[in-house]
Amino acid sequence: MKYWYAAANRLYYACYYAVLGLLIKNGYSARTHSGVFGLFGMHFVKAGIINNEQNKIFRNLFDLRQNSDYEDMFEADEESVKPLLEPAEKFIAEIEKLININS
């Protein structure tokens, strides 16, 4: 048995904590996932620092994680998770660049 639901969870949280680090570095604080999305959207996506396609990756990972963690009839599988591996890595790399600017 493959644990694709766990992979979906870890992919999302890797991106989430990268974004949280970026927000903290820039003086922003959020207590909820929706707060993180709101601040990230306002200060980095709408400002054009992060493009909307990268933001969609983050949102898709959140949706996949939510479904695999909380929906009884949903099961993450290789087909839904594997295509997100490389985009998630690129997303994290982009966030790391932003964190390291002026560090």
Image (tube, helix red, strand yellow):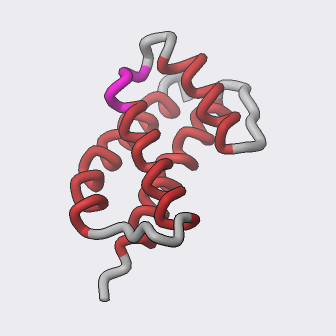
- 52 falls in the magenta region: yes
Please state which of residues 46 and 79 is positioned toward the viewer in this rendering: 79
Query: In the image, is residue 68 above or below residue 3?
Result: above
For this view, does 94 lie left or right of residue 46? left
88 on left or right of 102: left
* Residue depicted at x 38% and y 34%: 56
Viewer-nearest residue: 74 or 90: 74
User: Percent from the top left, x then y, of residue 32?
Assistant: 73, 43
Quadrant in which the N terminus appears? bottom left
Image coords of residue 83 (percent x, y): 22, 54
Q: Is residue 41 magenta?
A: no
Which residue in the rendered view is the most extreme toward the front?
Answer: 73
Q: Nearer the viewer, residue 60 or 71?
A: 71
The answer to whether residue 36 is above or below residue 12 is above
Q: Position of residue 71 (x, y in %)?
A: 53, 65
Q: Residue at (30%, 60%) from the top-left corner?
A: 81
Which quarter of the image is occupied by the C terminus? top right
Question: Which residue of the protein is positioned furthest toward the bottom in this rendering?
Answer: 1
Residue at 28% from the left image edge and 55% from the top image edge = 85
Q: Position of residue 62 (x, y in %)?
A: 49, 48
Q: Nearer the viewer, residue 21 or 44?
A: 44
Q: Main SS of the magenta segment? A: helix
Magenta residues span 50-54
Direction from residue 68 to residue 53 in the image, left or right: left
Q: Residue furthest top?
A: 47
Figure disc tally = 0
